[in-house]
Image: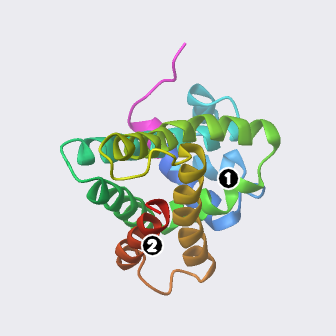
Amino acid sequence: MGKKRGQKYDQIIDAAVRVIAKNGYHNSQVSRIAKEAGVADGTIYLYFKNKEDILISLFEEKMGVFVEKIRDHIAHEESIEKKLLQLIEMHLMHLESDYDLALVTQLELRQSNLELRIRINDVLKGYLGLIDSILKEGIEKGFFPETLNIRLARQVIFGAIDEVVTNWVMKDHRYELVPLAKPLNKMLLNGLRH
């Protein structure tokens, strides 16, 4: 059975992002999320099993929409260099525009238990698959060498973008993220092409 969707579902997801960003995952009671969403405590359980389910669902929801936006955006782009740049720019733009979500994804999701981390990794597969598709196309077009280790290259790309965002969060977002996309893209491409 799939999850119920609708306006209240979205309100709860958005409220959970704000509450978890402000209080941390472990200090965010379901009742606080309900209050922030403007719904009764019991209403939460019509949509979610528990607090962990809310955390996973918010990540699935936000990441799912995000991956589709990137996929649509780069679908008609021919240049591998521009595809990777657009992926990086959109990643940075997405989190720069929603500091609460950045706090949750960069800090709170990483403090969770093993079962939760496994579920989060399942959600990440779509995004990592998108990076893989850019790398494979780059190899097919001769942009990257045939010897490129796709798995390692994907880890380098994701790890670099992720670390740039984490550093920005830890520095209390005192500078702009998006201007870092071009130099990051250039650095990654220079490393991957040799």
Q: Tag 1: residue type?
A: Leu
Q: Position of residue 118 (x, y in %)?
A: 72, 36
Question: From what the image shows, is residue 172 above or below residue 26?
Answer: below
Nearer to us in this view, 93 or 127: 127
Residue positioned most to the bottom: 174
Residue matched to label 2 = 187
How many neighbours does mark 2 have within 10 angstroms: few (below 14), some (14-19), or many (20 or more)?
A: few
Is label 2 in a helix, a strand or a loop?
A: helix
In which quadrant is the N terminus drawn? top right
Judge left or right: residue 46 versus residue 71: right
1 vs 2, front mark: 2
- Disc 1, disc 2: CB below 8 Å? no
**Residue sitting at 63 percent across and 67 percent down?**
22
- Which mark sits nearer the N-terminus, 1 or 2? 1
According to the image, what is the colour scheme of the structure?
rainbow
**Residue sitting at 27 percent across and 59 percent down?**
82
How many neighbours does mark 1 have within 10 angstroms: few (below 14), some (14-19), or many (20 or more)?
A: some
171 magenta-colored: no
Q: CA distance from mark 1 to mark 2?
A: 28 Å
**Residue sitting at 39 percent across and 77 percent down?**
183
Q: Tag 2: residue type?
A: Met
Judge left or right: residue 191 versus residue 28: left
Is label 1 in a helix, a strand or a loop?
A: helix
| Magenta residues (range) | 1-11
Residue matched to label 1 = 109
Q: Position of residue 76 (x, y in %)?
A: 18, 43
6 magenta-colored: yes
Q: Position of residue 25 (x, y in %)?
A: 72, 55
**Residue sitting at 41 percent across and 81 percent down?**
176
Residue positioned most to the top: 1
Q: Position of residue 77 (x, y in %)?
A: 20, 49
